[in-house]
Amino acid sequence: MLEDLAALLRLPTLFPRITKVLNHARAIFQLPNDAPFLLVDPNPGTGTHDWGYRWMDKNNLLMVFMGLSWGHQNCDPLWEVHVQCCDPKIAEMMRAGDWQVHAARRAETRFSEWDKFWHEDLAGTGVLLGTSAAATRFFEEESSEQMAAEYLGGAFYALHASGALQALLEVARQFADPGLGSTTL
């Protein structure tokens, strides 16, 4: 009970610090004005298991998340950037073609950090790929918040600059409207 009380006292200062990191990450890399993804809300928000920013395409096929995630099994908090398919059927079709694997490899070529992109092969989840690092890992650094912001901004940049994000969106569009033709990654 004492741990819970201590957590309650620290929470009001935690979210402003996380928001500061996220705002700095957005300043490091912002999508170009002609990008097909738009920021959902100008303020970071909470999901079921995360706190951060979200971008979606105009057809609500894919969502990009950048922020702090604590996972589905109450794991340690993670700084994370991931791409999620909003339609479970399209997500499964993308997995059947290993599109998330190809996109993760492609994004990884532009990610100069010490980490790499992972891909999600488990059915039933909309998350396709991303990169994540334990938030506690950054406590070892002298400027932990700066390093976390650079990690997030770098990952977001890698998704865009590598073409992986655009390619995934094109594949999702094809699966949503099969009359569009074929795409290669």
Image: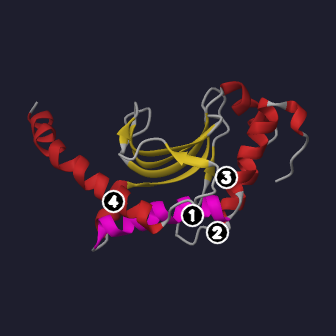
Inter-mark Cα distance, 4 to 3: 23 Å
Kindly identify which residue carries mark 4: 21
Part of the protein shown in magenta:
143-161
Q: Is disc 4 placed on a helix, strand or loop?
A: helix
For this orientation, the residue located farthest to the front is 33
Residue type, numbered disc 1: Tyr
Kindly identify which residue carries mark 1: 157
Give the mark, 2 or 4, whose residue is nearer the N terminus.
Answer: 4
Q: Position of residue 127 (x, y in %)?
A: 59, 38
Residue type, numbered disc 3: Leu
Residue type, numbered disc 2: Arg
Residue type, numbered disc 4: Val
Mark 2 neighbour class, 10 Å CA radius: few under 14, some 14 to 19, many 20 or more: some
Q: Is disc 1 placed on a helix, strand or loop?
A: helix
Inter-mark Cα distance, 4 to 1: 16 Å
In this rendering, position of residue 146 left or right of residue 106:
left
Q: Is disc 3 placed on a helix, strand or loop?
A: helix
Task: Find residue 159 and report its image quarter.
Answer: bottom right
**Quadrant position of the N terminus in the picture:** top left
Main SS, magenta residues: helix
Inter-mark Cα distance, 2 to 3: 12 Å
Query: Foreground residue, 32 or 48?
Result: 32
- Which residue: 27% across, 74% down? 142
Q: Is residue 153 magenta?
A: yes
Give the mark, 1 or 2, whose residue is nearer the N terminus.
Answer: 2
The image's mark for residue 110 is 2
Mark 1 in CB contact with mark 2 (< 8 angstroms) = yes
Task: Find residue 138 and report its image quarter.
Answer: bottom left
Inter-mark Cα distance, 1 to 2: 8 Å
- Which residue: 53% across, 70% down? 113
Kindly identify which residue carries mark 3: 165
Q: Position of residue 156 (x, y in %)?
A: 54, 59
